[in-house]
Image (cartoon, grey):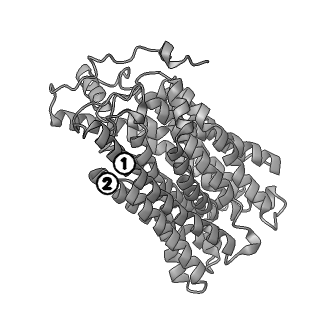
């Protein structure tokens, strides 16, 4: 569908909340608001977290399947590991191309229906992976998996921003992303259990079936439980709807409803900071995909058996989840994000330095995997919270967030190809590339912080210091609105 110029008005498919509905209102107490947040947490977070848990399991189980005979059964042994690298990276081809159009389209659809269909799609693709008998079959299943997951995960921060304030959203994004780490731990445990099962079906096929079927079920659950937008969900009472809409405009009055603004789409593609976020996300995802696909293999180079390596992937994921939530809580309270991006990317970089500098001490090398997983997950989560907050309109978020994530997913393709099996156990190229990218991300985050601070000071000089409690109308100019201030 074509989008009209802003001068002719936006595309409204349903009536948006009126200005009277979205005014600041003192007719409710803080206790009322806390009850609303608890209600949101009970209805939204468990469903989204379960969806991401199984989505991420379906994404990363290829690394476990590698140790359970998939290359021998389907890829004719794959002695160089090149075919496996291509199968692993096939997911990211569609995951890079689909997010921007998918999330813009999702803004015009009821969220629960959109997310439900996405989960059903990737669940079916995961189940079909178990039926693959050659290299093209695996490639098709992985490309389909990436397309359906692209319609879900990049849109979650935008969906959460409809319900949570800037003081709340960081922790919720962290809890959501923490389930990726939980999936890594859980996936290793499931793979270990399947490896001990001794069933007539191949272990890797059983792995895809066991981890794919729940995605279909959770997709149906999302259809029944997830709320639609605050202005039209049936989950709220009238009072709760008023509170939710008031909370929505605290950080700026966005283009609410099923609305797309053409000028905001163009602004997202012309904003250099979005590309800077893409660089940070590129570095994070290069490490992220490497961890997902190669952590079990890397741990086997420490001298452990395949089965024990599956178990030893669990502690780094558990620790990273704890650190991730702690960082998010602190950044919400302090209302600063950039410092934490610098810290977490540097932590991941230090982990790779340890792997490069200490080739023989397996205790130090195993500790390095904790630094890498904790730093990588923390970097991703904090970057998402940072830009969710600094992109001040829904349309610009719906364009810029999936766009810089798509740029970042190019790093996932790189990460799938820099750990060549024949270069083990040192993997000098893979560790060096990830190390350099993590420190580059820290530098880019510093540049963004300086840029945001300078822009805030410039607006203070030109327009005066804004009232912190004032509602800033970002409907027309998004984050370029004179009264809007960036979070550092």
Pointer 1 local density, CA inside 10 Å: few below 14, some 14–19, many at least 20: many
Please, which residue is most extreme toward the front here? 462
Residue, x 53% and y 45% (percent of image)? 272
Q: How many marks?
A: 2
Q: Which residue is mark 2?
A: 329
Q: Which residue is mark 1?
A: 170
Judge whether 301 appears above or below 63 on screen.
below
Residue, x 81% and y 51% (percent of image)? 135
Task: List x then y, in percent, for residue 278.
Answer: 56, 49
**Residues under numbered marks 2 and 1 in contact, where contact means CB atoms less than 8 Å apart:** yes
Mark 2: secondary structure: helix
Please, which residue is most extreme toward the bottom here? 360
Judge left or right: residue 159 versus residue 195.
Answer: left
Label drawn at residue 158:
none
Residue, x 82% and y 46% (percent of image)? 136
Judge left or right: residue 178 versus residue 88.
Answer: left
Residue 382 visible in image: no
Judge left or right: residue 81 versus residue 43.
Answer: right
- Image quarter where the N terminus lies is top right
Judge whether 7 appears above or below 24 on screen.
above
Residue, x 68% and y 71% (percent of image)? 429
Mark 1: secondary structure: helix
Task: List x then y, in percent, for residue 162.
Answer: 38, 32
Q: Can you tell which quarter of the image residue 150 is in?
A: top right
Judge whether 419 appears above or below 476 on screen.
below
**Frontmost residue, 302 versus 323:** 323
Residue 230 visible in image: yes
Task: List x then y, in percent, for residue 362.
Answer: 56, 82
Q: Real-space Cα distance between discs 2 and 1?
A: 7 Å
């Amino acid at each position: 569908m074509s989008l009209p110029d802003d001068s002719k008005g936006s595309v409204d498919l349903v009536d948006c909340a009126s200005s009277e509905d979205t005014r600041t209102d003192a007719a409710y107490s803080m206790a009322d608001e806390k009850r609303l947040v608890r209600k949101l947490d009970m209805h939204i977070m468990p469903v989204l977290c379960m969806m991401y848990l199984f989505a991420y399991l379906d994404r990363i189980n290829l690394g476990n399947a590698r140790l359970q005979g998939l290359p021998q059964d389907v890829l004719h042994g794959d002695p160089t590991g090149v075919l496996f690298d291509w199968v692993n990276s096939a997911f990211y081809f569609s995951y890079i191309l689909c997010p921007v159009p998918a999330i813009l389209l999702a803004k015009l659809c009821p969220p629960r229906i959109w997310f439900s269909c996405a989960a059903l799609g990737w669940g079916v693709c995961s189940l079909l992976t178990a039926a693959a008998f050659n290299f093209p079959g695996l490639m098709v299943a992985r490309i389909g998996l990436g397309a359906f997951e692209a319609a879900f995960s990049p849109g979650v921060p935008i969906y959460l921003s409809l319900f949570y304030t800037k003081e709340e959203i960081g922790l919720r994004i962290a809890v959501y992303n923490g389930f990726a780490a939980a999936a890594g731990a859980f996936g290793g445990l499931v793979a270990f259990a399947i490896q001990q099962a001794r069933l007539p079906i191949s272990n890797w096929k059983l792995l895809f079936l066991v981890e794919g079927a729940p995605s279909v079920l959770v997709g149906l659950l999302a259809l029944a439980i997830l709320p639609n937008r605050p202005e039209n969900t049936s989950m709220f009472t009238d009072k709760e709807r008023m509170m939710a809409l008031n909370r929505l405009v605290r950080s700026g009055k966005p283009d609410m409803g099923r609305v797309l603004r053409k000028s905001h789409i163009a602004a997202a593609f012309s904003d250099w900071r979005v590309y800077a976020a893409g660089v940070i996300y590129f570095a994070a995802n290069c490490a992220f995909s490497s961890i997902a696909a190669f952590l079990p293999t890397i741990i086997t180079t420490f001298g452990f058996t395949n089965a024990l390596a599956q178990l030893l992937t669990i502690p780094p994921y558990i620790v990273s989840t704890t650190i991730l939530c702690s960082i998010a809580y602190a950044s919400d309270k302090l209302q600063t994000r950039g410092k934490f991006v610098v810290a977490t990317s540097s932590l991941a970089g230090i982990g790779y330095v340890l792997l490069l500098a200490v080739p023989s001490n397996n205790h130090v090398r195993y500790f390095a995997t904790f630094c890498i997983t904790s730093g990588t997950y923390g970097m991703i989560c904090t970057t998402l919270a940072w830009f969710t907050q600094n992109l001040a309109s829904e349309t610009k978020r719906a364009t810029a967030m999936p766009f810089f994530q798509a740029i970042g997913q190019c790093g996932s393709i790189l990460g799938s190809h820099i750990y060549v099996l024949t270069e083990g156990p040192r993997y000098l190229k893979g560790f060096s590339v990830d190390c350099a990218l993590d420190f580059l991300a820290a530098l880019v985050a510093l540049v963004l912080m300086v840029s945001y601070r300078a822009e805030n000071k410039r607006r203070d000089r030109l327009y005066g210091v804004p009232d912190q409690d004032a509602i800033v109308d970002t409907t027309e100019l998004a984050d370029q609105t004179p009264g809007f201030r960036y979070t550092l």
